[in-house]
Image (tube, rainbow, N blue to C red):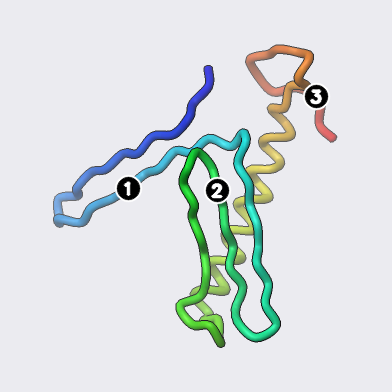
Amino acid sequence: MSKAASLHLWTEADGSTNYTVFLGAGGGSAHCSEYPDRTPILGVWRAGVDVSFQSDSDTRVTTAELQFARDLADMAAVYLAECERWHVPDDETGDGPTEHVA
């Protein structure tokens, strides 16, 4: 089953609004723009949605922003490991984890 993109909105009891965006992963791209004189920008694109992560400042990164970047990298590594565990080569089919880990 292929999933393209979906958006879910809901409101908490305290009135705050939450958003969940499902973009899938196939056919997307990610890019980190590095600059000699400003903070970097990480961009992720998929299903017509572009999400960018960058510091609130062009000249410094706060401790909280650095921690977010570390958490993002850690979770991307977990996601990669799980994708490798579940990977099925294009000429095979399957419904669960495989031993085709690189």
Q: Is residue 57 above or below residue 80?
A: below
Q: Is residue 74 above or below residue 69?
A: above
Spatial CA distance of label 2 from label 1 is 17 Å
Which sits earlier in the primary sequence, circle 2 or circle 1?
A: 1
Point out which mark residue 45 bears.
2
Q: Residue at x 78, y 14 (%)?
A: 91
Residue at mark 1: 19
Q: Nearer the viewer, mark 3 or mark 1?
A: 1
Q: Residue at x 63, y 52 (%)?
A: 30
Crowding near the residue tagged with mark 2, few <14, some 14–19, many ≥20 C-alpha atoms within 10 Å: some
Point out which mark residue 58 bears.
none
Q: Secondary structure at mark 1?
A: strand
Crowding near the residue tagged with mark 1, few <14, some 14–19, many ≥20 C-alpha atoms within 10 Å: few
Q: Amino acid at mark 2?
A: Trp
Q: Nearer the viewer, mark 2 or mark 3?
A: 2
Q: Amino acid at mark 3?
A: Glu
Q: Secondary structure at mark 2?
A: strand
Image-based side of 26 in relation to 53, left or right: right
Q: Is residue 94 above or below residue 18?
A: above
**Residue 53: image location, x then y, percent:** 52, 64
Q: Is residue 94 above or below residue 34?
A: above
Residue at mark 3: 99
